[in-house]
Structure formats: structure tokens, C-alpha cells
Image (cartoon, grey):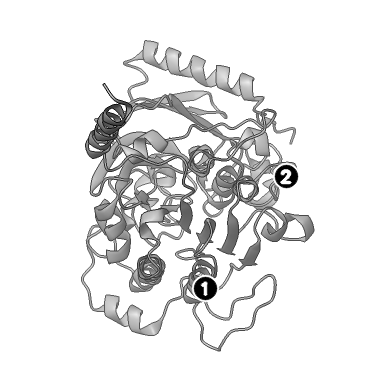
Amino acid sequence: MSRSVVRGMVALLLLAAAAQAPRNSWAADRKPNIVFILADDLGYTDVACYGSRYYETPNIDRLAAQGLKFTDGYSCGPNCQPTRAALMSGQYGPRTGVYTVGSIDRFDWKSRPLRPVDNAQGLPLEKVTIAQALKSAGYATGMFGKWHLGQQGDYHPRRRGFDEAIVSMGQHFEFTTSPKVTYPDGTYLADFLTDKAVDFITRHKAEPFFLYLPHFGVHAPYQAKKALIEKFAAKPAAGGHHDPTYAAMLASVDESVGRVVKTLDELGLSDETLVIFSSDNGGVGGYAREGIGKAGAVTDNAPLRGGKGMLYEGGIRVPYLFRWPGKIPAGTVCDRSINSVDLYPTLVALAGGKVAEDYPLDGTSYVSLLTSGGQGTWDREDLYWHFPGYLGAGKGSWRTTPVGVIRSGDWKLMEFFETGKLELYNKRNDVGEKIDLAASLPERVKELHAKMLAWRKQIHAPMPTPNPK
């Protein structure tokens, strides 16, 4: 057989293989752009594609329709700061020292049996952020919004791997920024941040970029554009969702998502860009059912139990959506459990980056789940939470006391450190955590508690100590 014939047969075989290759496979030699949009205090069911019949989120819903929706996505903490630390560092709280927001004296722990573990109020400078990892992999990096990991001196995101960074939180109108940026009177923060994000994408369209857009919406204070408030004021409440100002704030976050995606489409970048949308913790609501009457509920996470500041599902289960046309199958759903710490290794893997051998990551890349529409194999086993502090809800009332949690398969075990009480829930059969199975399944409790204790020992998790009073 002549060489030309052999070459021809090889070429035909390669063409046939290419024709049969799955359209949604990922070409490892290409660096995708990455856009990560993070909402603040957005509850699991606040998005229409996760159940809301009052709030309107057509652009966020479109991410689900065009990509992959995780039903069991989790934040690493029940409030803002620990989740952001985990997202940026790829590490659990015991490694970063970031467990909650502010100092331990934010709430009156001295009236309780335990002294909380001291909390780091900034991400330690020795931590390698995801921005630094992606920058080393050749990415332009930009961040616009709520940082919440320290912004003075070397803690500012501009010195933590972001080429460009504008930090703002605290107000939705008449807001301040770091560094100081001027803007027209009446500007709404979500619109301002989106303007900066769109400009960043446009300027970096010819190179791989990582855009982190952590909105301050829908966090208090509850402020929104008048026309949107009026729109929702005329709409009947549904399923515990009822506040027109909150709905208007969410509509502005949704509009931001739409503008970012539209920019990618118009620039011809959509097929080269992974868009991620999530929240830093559960919504502010669901407290009345727990007998907590002064926690300032503005939404409801039902059927999930509890809300922000709690380690029940309403406080830590959040929307997680991924869009990447041609790589992630459209309209797919995955029920595997993922956590904030898993994002770092996932993005590094997609970027072809490297992590130093002496820098431990607590998460696992879920690239195989993304490119298979949630059907691929994944070796992630258990998820852990370690919250060695208190979160109050008014005088003498508490959203949570110190607690540890493990999610293992369909099972979730909670250990409350003040009393040693253990609660066991089956997350497939009881998403609302109404039936504590600890008494009826002691062997399962023993198994999961042993895993939790082993994990705490392995990661050197500090425990709260007796209150000396």
C-alpha cells in the first residue's frame, strides 16, 4: 500500500473521529474567558428557575436554559465573608481563619457557654487568590464590587491578583468606592458595577480574561430604583416572596447579568466564555418558623429551612448556574453537591494553570460535571462546614450557635458544640429538614460523626472554648 493511500486513510479516520466526538467536549489547549457574577444574600428560591413566582429573573433563568443548573450548590458559610474567603482562596475556614463577619464581639457571646474562635477580618496575605493563580496562567483580571476580605493596603484586591479593582459596598445610592471614582448623581450601584464590567470585557476581548463581578445587591440597606419598586408593588405576593423593593433590587442584578451576557454575544465571545452565577449565602428570611422573630426577614427560602446566618439549608444552599455554549450542554441539571471551595480548582483546571504543591486546596475540580451536563464521574466525597461562633438575631435570640456540619451523599449531620446535640437529615427525602433521624439511625450518626471528627483533626480546626465568665 502506498504512503499516499495510507495518509488518505488516516485522514479519513481522523475526520470520522472528529465527526463522532461529542460537541460539548472541552479543548484543553484553549483558555476560556471566565465571568463570575456573585449576588449578595440572594436566597435559593429567590430566582424564578429555582422556584420564585414573584421575583422576575429572566436573564438569570436564561443561564439555566442555556447551560447547567446545580440543585445542590452550597456556599462555604452562612454569611458573606467566609464564603468569599473560600471562593478566593480555595480553602475552608480552618485554613484561612475566616469564619464569620467582623470580630467575635459583634454579638454578645459572653452570655453563652462558649467563647468563639477569633475571626480573621481579612484574607491572610499568604493565601494565593484565584486571581493570582489565573493571572499567572496568562489572564487579565478584573474585579468590581464587594470584596469584603480587607481593602486597606496589601489587602485590597488590586494587590491580590486583580489588574483592575474597584471596591464598593454599604449603599446602593450615593456609594463610596475604593479607589475613589466619580459618577453622576442618582447612579445605582449595580448599574455602575455593570458599566465597569462591560468596559473591562470590551477592552480585554482579544485576550483571556477573568472578570469577578460581586454585586452588593440584594444586601441591606434595601434600596432600589423607583420605577422598579412601583412595578412590583402592583404585583401580588407569592410563596413568601412579597417585598417590592427587594424584588426591584433583584431585578437590577438580573439586568446586570443580561447586559454582561449581551456584551459577550455582541463581541462574539460567548462560545469562548464560561459564565458563572451564584450567591454568597442564603436569603434573609425563614426565621419565624424557627421561632426567631427579630432577624429582619425580607424574603423566604421555603421549602428550605432557615435563612442567612444558619447552617440549615436555607442559610447555605444557593443557586449555581454555568453557561458556556458548545461546551456545557444547554438545559441540563445536576444534583451533585458542590461547595465554594470547589470553584478555585475548577477554574485553574480550565485555565491550564498550576497550584503550588505546598498550597493545599480543599475543593475538587468539577470540570467533568460541567462538560457532561452533570452526568460525568466526579470523585468529590463529603462537604464540611465549621462555624465556631455565634450569629445573633436581636437581644437573647440566635440564628446559630457554634456548629459543625457534614454533607455526605444524601445525608447531612449537624453537631451543635454547646450541647453536643447531633441532628441527622436525609436531603433527598427531606429537603426542609423537618425530620431529625439521629435517634432512629445511630449507626449512620456514628459513621458521619467519625468522619467529621477526622476532618477537624486533619485540617486542625480550632474549637470554641468554655466561657470563663
Q: Is residue 50 left or right of residue 26?
A: left
Q: Residue at x 41, y 39 (%)?
A: 312
Residue 315, placed above or below residue 1: below
- Quarter of the picture containing the C terminus is top right
Question: Mark 2: few, some, or many residues within 10 Å (few <14, many ≥20)?
Answer: some
Question: Mark 2 belongs to which amino acid?
Answer: Pro
- Quarter of the picture containing the N terminus is top left
| Residue 304 point in image, percent of width and height | 32, 44
Res. 199 mark? 1
Q: Residue at x 62, y 45 (%)?
A: 133
| Residue 76 point in image, percent of width and height | 51, 41
Observer-nearest of 296 and 357: 357
Residue 104: tell me if it is visible.
Answer: yes
Question: Mark 1 belongs to which amino acid?
Answer: Asp
Question: Most extreme residue toward the top, as rendered?
Answer: 443
Observer-nearest of 157 and 247: 157
Res. 222 mark? none
Residue underneath mark 2: 124
Residue 145: tell me if it is visible.
Answer: no
Element type at mark 1:
helix
